[in-house]
Image (tube, grey):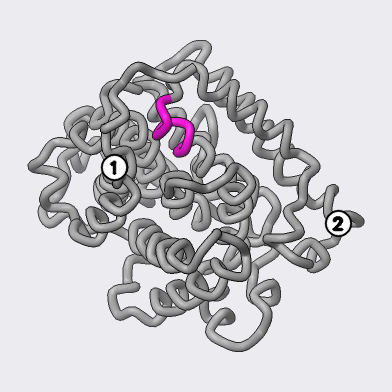
Amino acid sequence: MTSSRTTVKSAATGALTGLALGDALGFPTEFNDVPSILAKFGPWREIPLLKPAIVSDDTQMTLALGRGLRTAMAAGPLEARTLEPPLRREFVSWYHDPQNNRAPGNTCMTACQLLDSDRPWQRASRIGSKGCGANMRVAPIGLAPGLSAEQRSGAAQLQSALTHGHPTALAASDLTAHAVHLLARGTEPTGLVGLLRSYAYENRSRYPHHWLGDLWTHSQDPTPEHFAERGWDECLAVLERLQQALRTPSPETDPCLATGDGWIAEEAFATGLLCFLLFPEEPVTALRRAACTKGDSDSIACLTGAFAGAHLGADTWPAEWADRIEYREDLLELGALWDA
């Protein structure tokens, strides 16, 4: 079901701005439990956006992915052979950037160091990691116009696999991009979880050979289908927990208690989505709820912001917040390209 909301809502600009705002709001609260956050910042519904609004590696890697995607799409129809080289360059460039000093994850750092070579990317991928570092950055693939469902799914999984090769990281990235795409296209939040569960069931045994090559052979799985099913089954399990949490919503309770702390891919996806779905028409409240969590607050909040911005558009964010976000011009440039 799609909404009657105007289609000229600048969903890409809204999602990228929301992602960065959530990142900046959650960056100072990460690694703190809820009592510590409340003691430092006051009531969670009043958590301030600090000045300057500094972001973490989450936004930096989103921009790296966005630039690589832009380069690939300018070269013609999107496929693995056109996407992998510019993504690899952008990730390696981020790895060497002096501004890459925002507590980046070990998986991303190790994989990007290995990508800075002539080895096949599958040998750089951390096949055992399902950290949230891949799905926190995947929103651009859900926002870029003109992609088929197969291209969006394959690209989302490939960008994850360059660093996080665990099948659950791939599936969670795919689901995150699909959720952003659906919201940007006008899907109502009330039906979103059901659509995502259907999507997960449909894709459960599908291994995108064209996009991932022989990645699955680096695992212990007997078949590529078994490899894929491991990831989708973990995502289906967390979607069930999300659905249960939404049956009896408890906005004052730390969302991490329902769907997990967000350090791993499927939990970051589900907890970020839970925060959005608790307040689907109150995006700033949703971001503050996401930032006041005991888990990976900046990644949870950046996903919440991407969902909210895709749903409500660019104008939903307070101008006094949006105008002072770090990397503002870079975010606007990509948003304008895809909103056009």
Q: Residue 71's quadrant in the figure?
A: bottom left
- Foreground disc of the pair 1, 2: 1
Which residue corresponds to mark 2? 221
Please indicate whether residue 26 sits to the left or right of residue 48 in the image: right
Magenta residues span: 180-186
Q: Secondary structure at mark 2?
A: loop
Contact flag, marks 1 and 2 (Cβ < 8 Å) = no
**Residue 95 point in image, percent of width and height:** 42, 77
Task: Mark yes or no: residue 308 visible.
Answer: yes
Between 291 and 8, the one lying in front of the other is 8
Q: Residue 254's quadrant in the figure?
A: top left
Please tell me whether residue 330 is drawn above or below residue 26 in the rendered image: below
Please tell me whether residue 34 is drawn above or below residue 252 in the rendered image: below
Which residue corresponds to mark 1? 18
Furthest residue in direction bottom, as rendered = 118
Task: Mark yes or no: residue 104 visible.
Answer: no
Residue 185 is a magenta residue: yes
Q: Residue 15's quadrant in the figure?
A: top left
Q: Secondary structure at mark 1?
A: helix
